[in-house]
Amino acid sequence: MTWTELVVSVCGTFMTPNLDQHILDVSETYEADKEIILGVIHQESRCNTQAVGGVGELGLMQISPRWHIQRMQDLGRTNLLDPYSNLVVGVDLLKFLKVDKNPYKALAMYNGGYAMPESSKKYAESVIYKSNNYKNKIQTSSI
């Protein structure tokens, strides 16, 4: 299975044009794991670029403008319903949380803040499970 086929299979009807390439571009820029990014996108919004959460989180990675307005302004990305902008802000936050060093802790903090409630730990486990599954699908098909 190719990367594009994987993204299409995960996102299905919510597949946004060029989402596969957007994830690759942002993952390369931030040196972040593309499968973890896809796992977050699926967990947060089921790949719906127009998703709006219960307390105002927006887009693919469900970014809360209330908490991340400064990051958005610093990155020049204020339209969180734009898929590429949402990815940039979300992956920048994951990188800040050191997802490359400790993905479990970074993902739990991404979901639940510094308090990391039990539900956020389960969230982290789910995203890591999904990302490992995605990696296996790509590796298995390339053998």
Image (spheres, rainbow, N blue to C red):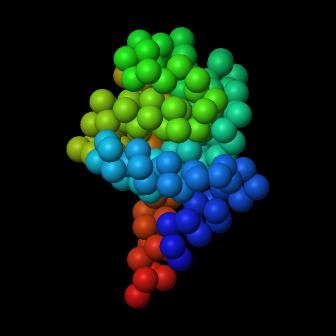
Residue 95 relative to residue 82: left or right: left
In front here: 130 or 27?
27
Residue occupying the point 58% across, 60% down? 7
Furthest residue in direction right, as rendered? 13
In front here: 142 or 18?
18
Q: Position of residue 126 (x, y in %)?
A: 51, 50
Q: Position of residue 12 (x, y in %)?
A: 71, 59
Residue occupying the point 64% across, 62% down? 8
In front here: 62 or 108?
62
Quarter of the image with the C terminus in it? bottom left
Q: Position of residue 130 (x, y in %)?
A: 51, 58
Q: Is residue 111 visible?
A: yes
Residue 6 relative to residue 109: left or right: right
Where 8 falls versus 89 (above or below)? below
Furthest residue in direction left, as rendered? 101
Furthest residue in direction bottom, as rendered? 143
Q: How many marks?
A: 0
In front here: 41 or 101?
41
Residue 45 relative to residue 37: left or right: right
Residue 32 relative to residue 19: left or right: left
Where 37 falls versus 134 (above or below)? above
Q: Quadrant of residue 75?
A: top left
Where 131 falls versus 121 (above or below)? below
Residue occupying the point 56% across, 44% down? 41
Residue occupying the point 43% across, 67% down? 135
Q: Is residue 105 visible?
A: no
Q: Position of residue 54 (x, y in %)?
A: 70, 22
